[in-house]
Image (cartoon, rainbow, N blue to C red):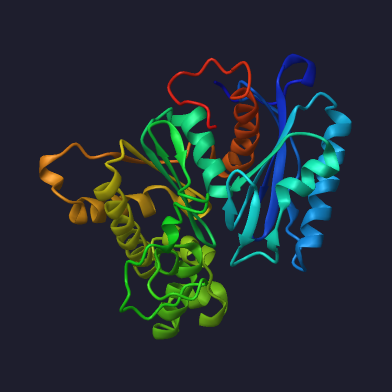
Amino acid sequence: MTLQDPLHATDCPGQAIGLDVGGTKIAGGVVAADGTIVERMPMIPTPPDDETGTLTALRRIIDELRARHPDVEAIGVGAAGLVEWPEGFIRWAPNNAYRALPLRRLLQDATGLPVVVDNDANTAAWAEARLGASASYMAFLTIGTGFGGGLILDGQLYRGTTGIGAEVGHMIVDPSGPYVCGCGSVGCLEAVATGTALGRYGQEAAAAEPGGLLAELAGGAVNVTGKTVFMAAQAGDETARSLFEKLGYWLGIGIASLVNVFDFELIVVGGGVADVGDLLLGPARASFEQFVFAGAHRRLPSIVSAHLGPEAGWIGSAILALDHEDSKGVDRTGMAAVAAPV
């Protein structure tokens, strides 16, 4: 499978709409069965009010995309939160307004098309496995405001009993630590290894060093964000670079825990924070090698940056929708390395 952009709809048989609903934005477009991006839509803010606003926004996007691409066959949605599979019922999301939302049923009723709804990290993991690494045992970690994950086991997405499994960001790695996660627990990986955590570390460092570059760039400690820390690190500030080392330390512990349990062949790291590359992944690899079980006596997985970048969520949603429909009939993907989900 390949990613190309742009192509006309008539050039790409077998198309689906893919949408990615995050805590702050909705992204999406139309993708063909071979992975070709037919159209990408401009991102819009996620409605902050309630599930009605989100549903209205999604229906408007779908209507607009179908008007330009009337041959789309299915709709896939990757949504932040606890999503039951295959019902597409979103139980709860810590950073979104929707609660107890039967999104799959509502969109199917509104559009008349087959719809799949899954956790956004799962759909991104599926895109990376199908279009990027083609790995049968892979963990995909997405690090931004929060910390999401998708697990590929024997070529299949692992979802647990009801579909809400693989919440790797809520593994407890520092239960005695000072940081409370947005979910309410103490010491989650999400509380110590995200862009939110990086901004908090930066504020603490700037408060301790009010004359330093972090405080100078932000105009005071209280204004420091993860972006501020990155800018300072790029400028060679040792304090800022040490904060990325701290972030990578916790990320490496999380990766080691996953590898100890699942023996993955590949770890793919995506999301906005991961865009900094080796500034984060270098310390993460070192920490992983320190904490992984029997590291000197086993083959260790590579830890690499995501192939598809921030578009993996909505691309994976579309591919997942087409694969799900193909599992009921003829598989047009031609892929053998990773089986289609049922």
Q: Position of residue 136 (x, y in %)?
A: 38, 31
Residue nearest the observer in this picture, 332 or 289: 332
Question: Looking at the image, is 209 positioned above or below residue 4?
Answer: below
Which residue is nearer to you in this view: 176 or 288?
176
Residue 3 is at least partly visible in this image: yes
311 left or right of 210 in image: right
Is residue 220 among what the camera can see?
no
**Above or below: residue 254 compared with residue 32:** below
Report the front residue among 7 and 142.
142
Q: Is residue 161 left or right of residue 81?
A: left
Residue 98 located left or right of residue 151: right
Q: Quadrant of the N terminus?
A: top right
Residue 105 pos. (x, y %): 75, 47
Give the image location of residue 250, x and y in percent: 33, 62
Name the residue rendered at 44%, 59% in the picture: 169
- What count of labels does the image hold? 0
Q: Is residue 122 depicted above or below 182 in this figure?
A: above
**Residue lying at 67% horizontally and 60% vertically, measured from the top left:** 24
Q: Residue furthest left?
A: 297
Task: Name the quarter where the C terminus is drawn.
Answer: top right
Q: Residue at x 35, y 58 (%)?
A: 251
Residue 315 drawn above or below residue 234: above
Q: Position of residue 261 (x, y in %)?
A: 27, 49
Residue nearest the viewer, comparing 300 with 338:
338
Identity of the residue drawn at 46% across and 52% down: 165
